[in-house]
Amino acid sequence: MSNDNHPSEIDQLKSNRRGLMVVLSSPSGAGKTTLTRRLMAADDNMTMSVSATTRQARPGEVEGHDYYFVSKDQFSAMIENEDFLEYARVFDNHYGTPRAPVEQALTEGRDVIFDIDWQGAQQLEQAAVEDLVKIFILPPNMRALESRLRTRAQDSDETIAKRMSKSESEISRWSEYDYVIVNEDVDKALSDVQAIIQSERMRRRRQMWLGPFVKALIDGG
Ligand SMILES: Nc1nc2c(ncn2[C@@H]2O[C@H](COP(=O)(O)OP(=O)(O)O)[C@@H](O)[C@H]2O)c(=O)[nH]1
Ligand SMILES: Nc1ncnc2c1ncn2[C@@H]1O[C@H](COP(=O)(O)OP(=O)(O)O)[C@@H](O)[C@H]1O
C-alpha cells in the first residue's frame, strides 16, 4: 500500500518512466506542424523539440517557439560543440535538434515530439532505437499537398515549386516508418497520432513498474 507521504516502490517506478521520442515526418505541406501543435495543446506530458535552422523565418514564426533561427556560422559552431542530437541539410538549409532540452525532458519522463525529416529519423534511430516511435504523414493526393502549401501562404512560388519537386523523394521514405497516416481530415489524423502514442506508452517494456506490481499481486499484496 502507499500513501501520499510514503510512495510505494511501484509508485516510484511509475514516476521513473523514461519518455518516448515521437518523430513526425512528411513531405512539406502534409500537415506535420499542424498536428504537432494540436498534439502539444492536448497533451500536458508532451514536449516539442524546437530545432535550430539556417532558413529565414516565415511571417508569423517566432524565435524559440517555431525554430531557433541561426546563421550558418552559429550552426557550424553548434555542430563543433556537439550541441546537436542530429542534424541534416534539407532544401538548401541546415536543420538540427538541440540535444540538451531533449535529454532533460526524457529524463523527467516527458515524451518528446520531433518534426524532422527522414535523415533526422535515421540518426535518432541509431542513437535511441528503444525510445523511438516513427510516424509518417501522407497527403490524400498531390493536388491537396500543393494547395496546402499555397493556402499556408508563407512561401514564394519558387519555394513552393522546389518543395513540390522534392515531395516525391520525401514520400518514397514512407516504408522506413513504424506508422503511416493519411492526413485527409485533420481531426481524424490527430486522433490517430494520439492512439499510436497511447499504445506505445502501454508497451510492456516501457511499463517498468509491472514486474514488482505482478510480484506483489501474486504475493497477495
Ligand atoms: N533532420 C532534421 N530535419 C528537420 C529539423 N527541423 C525541421 N526539419 C525538417 O526540415 C524540413 C523543412 O522544414 P520547414 O522549412 O519548417 O518546412 P515544412 O516542411 O513546410 O514545415 C521538414 O521536413 C522538417 O521536418 C531538424 O532539426 N532535423
Ligand atoms: N487535413 C488537412 N486538411 C486541410 N488543410 C490542412 C490539413 N492539415 C493541415 N492543413 C493545412 O495545410 C497547410 C500546411 O500544413 P503544415 O502543418 O504547415 O504542414 P507541414 O508542417 O507538413 O509543412 C497549413 O495551412 C495547414 O493549416
Image (spheres, rainbow, N blue to C red):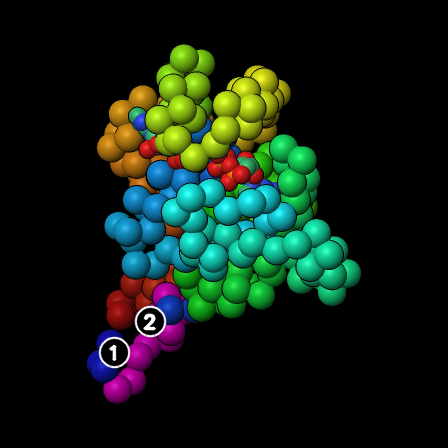
- Placement of 66 over or under 116, stated as above or below: below
Q: Per the image, is 111 magenta?
A: no
Q: Magenta-highlighted stretch: main secondary structure?
A: helix
For the N terminus, the image quarter is: bottom left
What amino acid is at disc 2? Asp
**Quarter of image, res 110:** bottom left
Front-most of residues 119 and 108: 119
Taking the image in four quarters, ligand 2 sits in the one at: top left
Query: In the rendered image, which residue does mark 2 sit on?
Result: 11
Q: Residue placed at 50% from the left, 47% from the top?
A: 57
Is the CB of the residue bearing disc 1 within 8 angstroms of ligand 1? no
- Placement of 218 over or under 131, stated as above or below: below
Where residue 117 sits: x, y (%)? 57, 37
For the C terminus, the image quarter is: bottom left
How dense is the environment of label 1, judged by Cα within 10 Å: few (below 14), some, or many (20 and up)? few
Q: Are marks 2 and 1 in contact (CB under 8 Å)?
A: yes
**Does any portion of residue 104 appear in the rendered image?**
yes
**Does any portion of residue 199 appear in the rendered image?**
no
Front-most of residues 73 and 189: 73
The boundaries of the magenta stretch are 5-14
Secondary-structure class at tag 1: loop
What amino acid is at disc 1? Ser
Where residue 9 sits: x, y (%)? 37, 75
Is 220 situated left or right of 91 in this image?
A: left
Query: In the rendered image, which residue does mark 1 sit on?
Result: 2
Q: Earlier in the sequence, mark 2 or mark 1?
A: 1
Where residue 138 sits: x, y (%)? 44, 23
- Placement of 100 over or under 146, stated as above or below: below
**Quarter of image, res 93:** top right
